[in-house]
Image: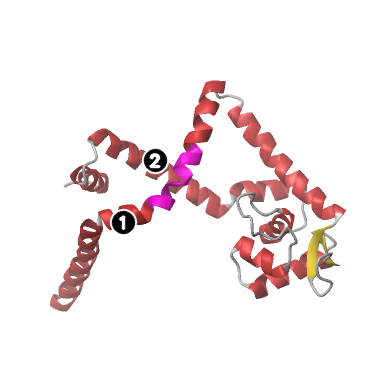
Amino acid sequence: MPTRQDTLRDLLTRSGKNADLADALIRIDIVVQNWRRQMHKRELGHRATRALGLDMDLAQIDVLFAIANPPLPSDANADDETMVSTVAERLHIDPSRASRLVAEMVNSGYARRAVSQRDARRTILELTAAGEAVIDAVRGYKWLLLGEFFSTWPAEDVAAFVPLLERYSSWMNSSEVAEEKFADEIDELARSIERAKTEISSSSKSG
């Protein structure tokens, strides 16, 4: 009986990809799945809070980073003043949750509210010295560990890895074009789900 990987390999080869590429994509997917699980658990973040003795959870630390983070250089229309709505946007959370988390950080002395220099009617957010210290410590913790890991790599491997990782990270930008290209194959995948559901329903009724 073919394995799930065999099925995926067959799908890729039928779409015109050679067997070597199919095998490479399967390996990449396994690595990314494991990486995603680690990121979801946020193991490094929990280790950092324990090692640094921080009296806050990761959601609160995220707020401090959201306040500290400047707009992306590529975003010409971004505002370099941070408000509660900015925090909500950067963290992709509900404004009410952002407001609550910001209030916790202000009350704890890690952030403060200030008046905008551009518009006195607008309240902006800034980090206090304590908030800056948290950001610097968490970043320092990560860079120490990351630096130690990559220091074991040959320099040429690091030089090759960085642009390749940047290129890989942009693959979703072209996914809509690929989705249009394989519309028929994707429709068939959707139909396979419906067929499986029908089989389950029929089996339940017969039982």
Place of residue 99 in the rendered image (x, y in percent of width and height, measured from the top left): 71, 72
Q: Write down the quadrant of residue 121 in the picture.
A: bottom right
The furthest residue to the left: 206
Q: Is residue 172 magenta?
A: yes
The residue mark sitting in front, 1 or 2, is: 1
Q: Residue furthest bottom?
A: 205
Quadrant placement of the C terminus: bottom left
Which image quadrant for residue 27? top left
The amino acid at mark 1 is Glu
The residue wearing badge 1 is 179
Q: Nearer the viewer, residue 86 or 52?
A: 86
Judged from the image, the secondary structure of the residue bearing numbered disc 1 is: helix
Is 83 rendered above or below residue 146? below
Residue corresponding to mark 2? 28
Q: Looking at the picture, which amino acid does disc 2 mark?
A: Ile
Q: Who's the residue at 69% across and 46% down the image? A: 48
Mark sitting on residue 165: none
The magenta span reads 165-174
Residue 200: x, y in percent?
Answer: 20, 70
Q: Which residue is at the front of the view, 119 or 207? A: 119
